[in-house]
Image (spheres, rainbow, N blue to C red):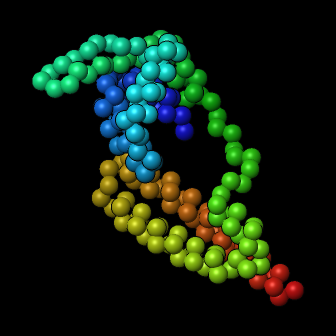
Amino acid sequence: MSTAHVMLGLLAERPKHGYELKKEHDHRLAGAKPLAYGQVYATLQRLERDGFAEVAETQQEGGPERTMYAITGSGREELARWLNTVEPPAPYVASSLFARVAVAGRGADGYLLRQREAHLARMRELTAAKAAGPPAQVLAADFALQHLDADLRWIETALSRLKENNDA
């Protein structure tokens, strides 16, 4: 995920300040790692440096000064380019789950059984969270559930292959 592009997308709606961008990011990308405030401001500085965002105004209403940022024409072009770029399928297996099983080899069955239980517990949590969650939370839960489901199918396949190898 490109934090800069997500922030451009949030700025495309209207000018916003850093605190608002952080809160909106964390709300819309429910389930994603929350942004640190330092990351928000560093990203805004890079967007401004690259000509994708600019200071729209500075406000001070009884609190700290807030700098409002707006997307530029170049920023809109960059956002459109990013939104229209197809994400390439991951060419490599980059999962700690796979790495543990590959290293453990024939002795991975105990780990796989424990991991399956952890996946099922997380799936129950996510299913419960979907019941009363806002749309962003439901979409995030659906995304996570489908990835966990794919992991579970792979775990079952791995257990079956390990059993076949142990029986042979």
Residue 118 vs 36, above or below: the answer is below
| Quadrant where the image shows the N terminus | top right
Q: Position of residue 150 (x, y in %)?
A: 61, 62
Residue name at image x 32 percent, y 38 percent: 23
Residue name at image x 57 percent, y 27 percent: 82
58 lies left or right of 165: left
Q: How many marks?
A: 0
Residue most extreme to the left: 62
The answer to whether residue 121 of the structure is visible from this angle is: yes
166 lies left or right of 86: right
Residue name at image x 54 percent, y 59 percent: 146
Q: Position of residue 139 (x, y in %)?
A: 43, 50
Q: Position of residue 104 (x, y in %)?
A: 73, 73
Q: Position of residue 102 (x, y in %)?
A: 75, 67
| Quadrant where the image shows the C terminus | bottom right
- Quadrant position of residue 149: bottom right
The answer to whether residue 76 of the structure is visible from this angle is: no
Residue most extreme to the bottom: 167
153 lies left or right of 58: right
Residue 58 vs 114, above or below: the answer is above
Residue name at image x 28 percent, y 13 percent: 57
